Amino acid sequence: MVENLIEVKDLYKWFPIRSGLLGRVKNYVRAVDGVSFSIKTGETFGVVGESGCGKTTLGRTVIKLTEPTSGSIIYSGRDITKLKGRKMKEYKKKMQIVFQDPYASLDPRQTIGSAIMEPMFIHGLVRDRKEARSKAEFLLEQVGLNPDHFSRFPHEFSGGQRQRVAIARALSLNPEFIVLDEPTSSLDVSVQAQILNLLSSLRRKLNLTYMFISHNLAVIRQMCQRTAVMYLGRIVEIAETSRIFENPKHPYTVALLKSVPLPDPKKRKMLVSLEGDVPSPVNVPSGCRFRARCKYATELCADKAPELIEIEKDHWVECHYDIDFSREAKVNTITA
């Protein structure tokens, strides 16, 4: 077992913008713009940030559901960036994804049993339909559903039940690594807790590794051992989740934590809204991407883009300055 199941080095994903009769490329949407990180075997690695920062594109690119523009993706010690066809198919079954909207990711004309069995047939993991059905019913039981629901259609289930079906389908190929793309954001709060507990239980039971994408900081704190904070296609801070919440080092991370409302009036502090809008990923600002919204920005921030550096063991920050935020009003204590 390798220490790092996933290693991403200088990863880019640019989407071309075409115009004119000939469809010439006029510009690019820089969804993921030079990202590097690693995910340890058996951990839940969180990715958090505002909508439009590139979280989902990063997750899809890591498992090559979207082909990267450049950079490298190393899985279990092997560079899979340029693998295609049969060679990549072997890795595809090891890496799965659970999407945000379970209803959109399930075929409404296909029974849930058929949806779970289909990947098994594609990858040749079963000999016949009888074996496939037996495995599918077992998976339904594992995710907390009744195997007797095998022949029902997605519209006959609630949102939480549909997400359980999506999880069962992801597990049908016995994967090692699963990207969870905001798997609870479309669910009721009570159902969210059930799904999160299920995911935690499955990770321990099946020795899974997760990449958990979310904008919900409370969920990230509950689920993830390490967390990356993403802004406009870049990762601006990576550290153990406890450090991110207790000792944030990037101004954007601090702003995110301060902007979260708390349900307990005794713990509630003055909310600080993050001023300004996220710049366009088409016209990325020079220097530091966060400088237009950062009160600490200087001329250096406009002239030179900061690098992601390790300021202390396993704590990486993309900022020119080591700012002491302890002098400011204490960051909200966020609990799940």
Image (cartoon, rainbow, N blue to C red):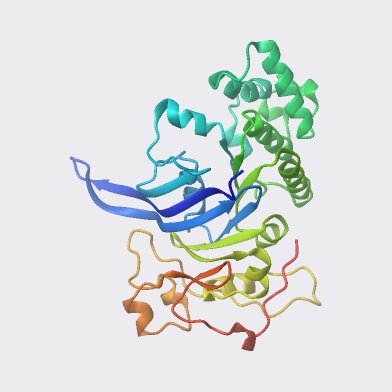
Instruction: Give the residue furthest to the bottom.
Output: 327
61 horizontally vs 176: left or right = left
The total number of labels drawn is 0
Q: Residue furthest front?
A: 1
- In the figure, is residue 235 to the left or right of 34? right
Where's the N terminus, which quadrant? top right
Is residue 301 shown to the viewer in this render?
yes
- Position of residue 116 in the picture relative to residue 195 (left or right): left
Between 197 and 267, the one nearer to me in the picture: 197
Q: Is residue 147 left or right of residue 36?
A: right
Is 102 placed above or below 260 here? above
Question: Residue drawn at (74%, 44%), measured in percent from left and top?
Answer: 204
In the rendered image, residue 234, in percent from the top left (x then y), is placed at 45, 62
User: Which of the image's four quarters has the C terminus?
Assistant: bottom right
Return the x and y of residue 152 as percentages of the image width and height.
71, 22
Given residues 180 and 81, the one toward you in this image is: 81
> x and y percent of residue 238 in the render?
55, 64
Q: Quick check: can you spot residue 52?
A: no
Q: Position of residue 327 (x, y in %)?
A: 63, 89
Quarter of the rendering containing residue 328? bottom right
Residue at coordinates 43% horizontally, 41% vertically from top-left? 66
